Structures are given as C-alpha cells and as structure tokens.
Amino acid sequence: MKQEIEKRRTFGIISHPDAGKTTLTEKLLLFGGAIQSAGAVKSNKIDMHARSDWMDIEKQRGISVATSVMGFRYKDFKINILDTPGHQDFAEDTYRTLTAVDSVIMVIDSVKGVEAQTEKLMEVCRMRNTPVICFINKLDREGRDPFDLLDEIEDKLSINVRPLSWPIGMGKSFKGVYSLFESSLHLFEASRNKVMEGIKVDDITDPQIESRIGENAATELREEVELVEGVYDPFEVNSYREGQLAPVFFGSAVNNFGVKELLDCFIQIAPQPIPRATDKRLVKPDEKDFSGFVFKIHANMDPRHRNRIAFVRVCSGKFERGSNYYHVRQEKSLRFSNATAFMAQERETIDEAWPGDIVGIYDTGNLKIGDTLTEGEDGTFKGIPSFSPEIFREVINKDAMKTKQLEKGLQHLMEEGVAQLFSYEIGNRKVIGTVGQLQFEVIQYRLKNEYGASVDWRNQPIYKACWVDSEDQKELDAFVKSKLRHMAKDKDGKMVFMAESKAWLGMVQDNFPRINFHYTSEY
Ligand code: G4P
C-alpha cells in the first residue's frame, strides 16, 4: 500500500479561460502516452456564442464526464489530473474539485499576467494551503517582462514565488529556457509535436551556453540568473508543500515547450496523497480501512434513467469493487458493485483503487456532494464548503400539476451541485443562487427535459447569503425573529441570512454584534 501511495500524484490544472489549461493538459497526456495525437482532448469550454443551442450544453455535459478525471502513467508514477470547468459560471464546481486534489498547477498567460479568475482560484487554494506550481505560458508571444510577472504573482496572489526555470528572450527572440532546477539548457523550436531533449550543462558559467545561444544572449541570461539567485531564496520543497511558496516554470504549451521539464520536476516535488481531516480526526492515507468522499456528481446522459455517477476521492485504504461501504450521512451500508476508474479518455471497470485515485460510482440517488464513505467509522471529511452565490432568483412554478416533479428535479439538480437552493422560513418561497447566469438556463432546460416541470425566474435583489451562528442563543433567537422575512435554510437545514445590500448587511452586523456572519457554509 505504501508503494501505491508514493506513486500517486493527484492534481488539478487551473487557469483563467484561454491561458492554456486545455493545451497543457493535452501535452501532459501525450507524455504519459495516454493519447496519441494532439487535438484529442476536447476543450470543456462552453461557446458563449452558441448559447441558445441547448444541445451544446448537453454535449458539454458529456465531454465534461469524459474529461473529468484523466489518469495516466509516467515514469512509474500514476498521475491523476482532475479537470475543472473553464467557464467562470461553473466556478463552484471548480472549487469543489479542488478539495479532491493534493496540489495544483496554475497556468498564467505571459501576455495577460494574473487575471480575475486566477485570483479567485488562488484564494480557494489558500483556504486549504494547497501547493501550487505556476506555469507561465505563451513565451512564443511578446509577453511581459518575467520579473514583472513574478512581482505581479506575488502581489496579486499573495504567495512567494521561486523561478525554477528562466526564459531566454521572449516572443520573436525567444530562444528557450534555462532550467535552474537541473542546470540544463532547453532550446526552443516551434513545433507542436516534437520534444527537444535538454542539454545538460555544468552550471550557468558553462561555455556551452555561448556556443548554443550566442554571446549576447548568454551574457543577458547570466545577469538575469544572478539577479534571480540574489532576489529569491533557494527553493525549499517544504515551503512549497505547505502552500507558502510557488515554484515557477516558463514555457509554451502549444509548442510542447517547457512541459516535460515541468512534469519531471512535478513528479519529484509534488506531494503524494496527504492526510485529510474529518470532523472527528485526521485520516492518514496508509490506514488499512478504506475511506473517501464524494466531490462531484454527474447526471447520466440518458434522461430516461436517472442514475448518476458520483466521483469519490479515495483518502485511505483500498477501495474494492463489490464491497459494502458505510454511508456516514445515511448511517447505512451500501454495496458498490459497479465502479469505474478514469484512464485518460476511457472509463474502465476497476476492481480496486488506492488513496489519491478517483473512483466513479453509479448511484441511483443515495449520494450527495460532500458525503463520506468508510468501512464503518463515523466522521465526515471536512473542507467541501458551499460559497455564497452571486446571483439569486426565486423559482416560479408555471405548472401546478407538476409540483412533485419540480420538487424532485430541484432536489436532484441541487444534489449534483448545479446551484444552491434556499428555502425561506416564511411563505414557502424557494430561491436559487448561482455564481453565473448560465446555470439558470441549464436548470430551466433540464427541469423541463428530464422532469417535465416548467419554471420561470423572478430576480431577487440579494447581495450575499450569509450563514449565521452565535454562542449566544438568546441573541440568535432575537436576530432570527427580527429578520424572519430574510431568513432561509440551505440544503442541509443550516440557517442563512439573505442580505439585500452591502450597506444593509453592515448595519445589521453593527446591530447584532454577537452574531457571526459567514460567506461559506463551513466555518
Ligand atoms: P484554456 O483551456 O485555458 O481556456 O485554454 P486553451 O488551452 O484552450 O488555449 C487557449 C488558446 O491559447 C488556444 O488558441 C491555444 O492554442 C492557445 N495557446 C495555448 N498555449 C499557447 C502557447 O504556448 N502559445 C501560443 N501562442 N498560444 C497558445 P485558440 O486560437 O483558441 O485555439 P487553436 O485554434 O490554437 O487550437
């Protein structure tokens, strides 16, 4: 078991859309021999121009199951890449997927630098101290000065950086990278399929460098490397693993350049599956008993059958197909005879899985996001919070004859994590919250197609959903009583205050100093 665990690297690639996440994923799979040619990985981007074409969204769901988890082998390592939706309307899905990884590779566009979505994703990584490696992409373009980019990463992402490779020129004059990690020179050649072997040099003073890139470029490289060594502390693998320091690589994913160096370093420094906390204790991966949690649920593509695939991250022990496992929330034992692993583009039935692996389990409605499975032990894995949505709309049932169907449909879609449902304390009002506009269209479409229910939306002027609690039960009671019209319950029955504006929330906070207001459901 120890060996199996040491071999595993489970990580996510994240980026602002268009920085090159899909391209990098594809190149990594090429190295692993998991795919044979470029272009095999479908982008999971939703084309906003084709938005009215609902089939696109449906197709999208198919693609995102196929590429949700891509496992491959490389140099005796078993690597699991967890894909995250590129579209920001699906940010919540990305946040949840990040709870199931042990580390992250963040792709940054050298022309655009740190973008809005990069910042948000980094915040999520920081919540759990997830180790991050940065890959600065598109060096074949006239990008920004590398020192400026590093400063921007430190500044906007609040993390220390340490370059492990350094670019020689950029754009038209891009000559390659010097690897500070293994003292080697990698010369650039624009080619989508060829990978050039690095040239081993003794160190930065090696005269081979002149002969390869010319005197001027060599002098400039030496000056810059000297500056790098002077400005940044030596690379400390533990600071990286604690999420305090981000090693940085430079390259061009589309040209397959800098990707192999990234991967070779990644398998050496990235953490193997790490211990994870439940609400009872810390669970170590090498414990004998199996445990895992559900971080994603995907409805089956066939609307006639309501079965779903639950994605389970194995946290400890060995998962065996056909075994009974204990469903902690429902306090009952379930048998999982149908389990799949995800190897690159294919799904295959598996008999066993190890910590770090993701198992797909067919489910007919027992599992929800955040559920824990064990061999009988109580305790739920922590760290899968809901975040306050940004857009809120009340559900208007257009067909009273289909109320039951609507309720069932809403329940299923919420269990899949498509959006969050808030049920008001008064008046039986139901409000759905999302991070993006697109989900409302998806929900409306799916309710109609899969459940036969018709809904409309009524905009709600809500600024934030705040989960509330207090040590002072009296004050909590008084608060709830005075704000009853704005109180709702979330999917787990937790109390939420629906604040209508920032200013009003501030006032309410002043009036009730002993109430805690949280922007996430886990506090
Ligand atoms: P994403 O998943 O992060 O959204 O980005 P994706 O990989 O789809 O890449 C976005 C665009 O950037 C693609 O161009 C891709 O080819 C390009 N790209 C990726 N890496 C590099 C690079 O190193 N250099 C340059 N110059 N471009 C790069 P596209 O026009 O959308 O698609 P395509 O027609 O090129 O496939």
Image (cartoon, rainbow, N blue to C red):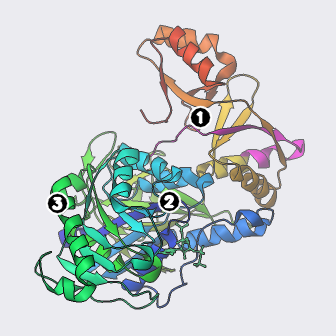
In which quadrant is the C terminus drawn?
top left
Q: Indicate which disc, 1 or 3, sits on the residue closer to the N terminus.
A: 3
Marks 2 and 1: in contact by CB < 8 Å? no
Residue visible at 20% across and 80% down?
A: 184
In which quadrant is the N terminus drawn?
bottom left
Quickly name the residue at label 2: 112
Give the number of the mark in front: 1 or 2. 2
Quickly name the residue at label 3: 229
Magenta extent: 382-407
Marks 3 and 1: in contact by CB < 8 Å? no
C-alpha span from label 1 to label 2: 38 Å
Looking at the image, which is closer to me, 232 or 305? 232
Question: In the image, what residue type sits under mark 1?
Answer: Asp
Residue 463 horizontal/vertical position (percent): 64, 30
Residue visible at 40% across and 58% down?
A: 325
Label number found at residue 198: none
C-alpha span from label 1 to label 3: 51 Å
Looking at the image, which is closer to me, 162 or 373? 162
- Does any portion of residue 64 appear in the rendered image? yes
Q: Secondary structure at mark 1?
A: loop
Marks 3 and 2: in contact by CB < 8 Å? no
Determine the image quadrant of residue 343. Answer: bottom left
Is residue 384 on the magenta stretch? yes
Looking at the image, which is closer to me, 329 or 275? 275
Quickly name the residue at label 1: 490
